[in-house]
Image (cartoon, grey):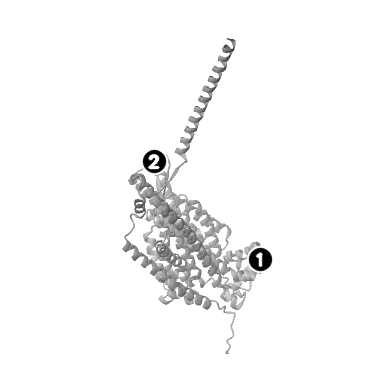
Amino acid sequence: MAASIKAKPRGSAAKSLSKMAAKTTAKATATAQVKSSTSATETTATIETTMGTTTASTTGTPTTTVTTEDASSLGGDHVFRWVYFFFLGYLLMLALWKAYDIRLGAIREYGMVIHEFDPWFNYRATEYLYYNGWERFCTWFDYKSWYPLGRPVGTTIYPGLQLTAVFLKNHIVPSMSLNDICCLMPAWFGAVASFFVGLMAYESAYSAELERKQKSPSFAMECGIAAAGIMAIVPAHLMRSIGGGFDNESLAFTTMTGTYYFWCRSIRDDKSWPIGVLTGIMYFYMVAVWGGYIFVLNMVGCHAGILVLLGRYSTGVYRSYSLFFFVGTFLSIYTLPVVGWAPLKSLEQMGPLLVFLVYQLIEICEIIKRKKGLNQVQAWELRFRVLGWGLLVSVAVGFLLTPSGYFGPLSARVRGLLVKHTRTGNPLVDSVAEHQPANKSQYFQYLDNVCYVAPIGILMCLYDFSNASTFMVLYAIVSYYFSSKMVRLIILLGPCMSAAGGIALGRTFSWSVYQFVDVSSRIIVDDAKKKSTKKKKKGNASATEGQEQKSGGKITSVVSLVKKLVAGSCFYSIYYYSPQFYSTCVKMSTALSHPSIMFKAQTSK
């Protein structure tokens, strides 16, 4: 009895323990199932392989089907895309190397020798700055220049070229002699200018793609590389950047193209306006290097004004232009004695100043419009009132200041752009041969085949309308007009014609490549989205139907064949004419590489 009584608790305890273990196991199983189902809903996918088709199904997300053939095709395209990008990188490095190498002809032939009169004066000023410092340089009166009158160099020179050479000597290449640095600077900065022109073309093409939200392959990289390649060797750029030609223009075109690029980049969208500070700094560098900074200032100011007329004004554009004008003008007035107060007094620079003031008035109107919630009619009435009062105040100020001689007159060279070159009133300007109007043969001499290609690029810029492309069109028009007045200003056509030609060649090359293989990552993503959307609507489809969906919407096979033939002809044309263009540029480089102070003996064999 006792044993039986004692055994019951043991049995009941065992049963209770087994029940508790079962409950614990059930809870753990339920918890694991909940966790597994949750994780499956969020992150996991079930891969089923059936008849050569791999299906990825994820709970709560669209189901996509990728065949093994598609996977291998995508993998091949991915590899080819990387090879293509490396090829583009190689072309860019080749262009920059050629930009440097083609300018060394005179140095290989004659050694490290400074050319012509102006480069020798620049070198002499550089030596004085290097040995005596900035303070003594600013007060230097050179009795040997303009003899017997002499010249106050510190207040009549644009010192950026000398400062750059001394900086390179002190901080970058101290082992090189000052003479060698001055001889090689045109070649170095010729390559940098080519790179900036490539960036200009890239920005023009890329901003147009963003404006149109382009779904087709991107061609911006090809445009930039082609533009850099043209600028690297085009004679219009070589004429002032040959090794040994230590002249202001050899550095000025680097700073000019840099200013243009940063300006175009700063107005890409409303978030890009802080780059306006870099635009102002690069413009200040341009002012320090060359007196032609007036052209750069008026180009940017004119473009800012045209953006308002085209209805493309925005707060981002306002901030970018305001930063550019304020930073560049302030630094120029504060640090460069040769400039002084000219940006606020010279008639040649009044246009950009007026645009700056108009921008302030327009932005005030925009702020009032946003605060008061004005409609379009009320906003335009406000603008007319504010701008009208601003115009009256400007006229009154000009009327009061003009009799006192506050505004300076137009220079003789600027007058030469507006009137016939023999009637400027300055005999020195009128007698110079390079101040004569350019003719057709001179355009082809310094631009060669770019004369045919660049207009196509300008038309493409008109088609792909954006802030940067409008600048390219305006730059081409203005520089062509000025070069038609003075042959020496064909040099201004070099950057814009190179960029426009690069846009034409880059788009043509990119389109031709795409006819054979897809090298654009953007189009791959868009196609994947389209395929996933179609399959979400139609459900699971067979491998044949999926392949049809992937190729659906493409052109017919006949049209595709015609496009491939056209693409092949484009490849052949580029392959055929590029060596000819390069050969012409090399010949021009050789012709420009003869310093007048050196004479090569002619011997008969």
Residue under label 1: 130
Residue 258 x, y percent position in the rendering? 51, 61
- Where disc 1 sits, the SS reads helix
Q: How many marks?
A: 2
Query: Which is more toward the observer, 303 or 350?
Result: 303
Q: Which residue is painted at 59% across and 80% down in the image? A: 598
Classed neighbour count for the residue bearing mark 1: other residues with Cα under 10 Å, few (<14), some (14–19), many (≥20): some
Quarter of the image with the N terminus is: top right
Mark nearer the N terminus (1 vs 2): 1
Q: How far, Cα to Cα, is label 1 from label 2?
A: 60 Å
Q: Which residue is painted at 45% across and 67% down in the image? A: 498
Residue 603 x, y percent position in the rendering? 58, 88
Residue under label 2: 372
User: Which amino acid type is shown beneath numbered disc 2?
Assistant: Lys
Query: Which is more toward the observer, 346 or 317?
Result: 317
The reply to whether the C-beta atoms of the residues labelled 1 and 2 are less than 8 Å apart is: no
Tag nearer the camera, 1 or 2: 1
The residue at the far bottom in this view is 605
- Where disc 2 sits, the SS reads helix
User: Which amino acid type is shown beneath numbered disc 1?
Assistant: Tyr
The residue at the far top in this view is 1
Classed neighbour count for the residue bearing mark 2: other residues with Cα under 10 Å, few (<14), some (14–19), many (≥20): few
Q: Quadrant of residue 557?
A: bottom left
Q: Quadrant of residue 10?
A: top right
Residue 343 x, y percent position in the rendering? 50, 59
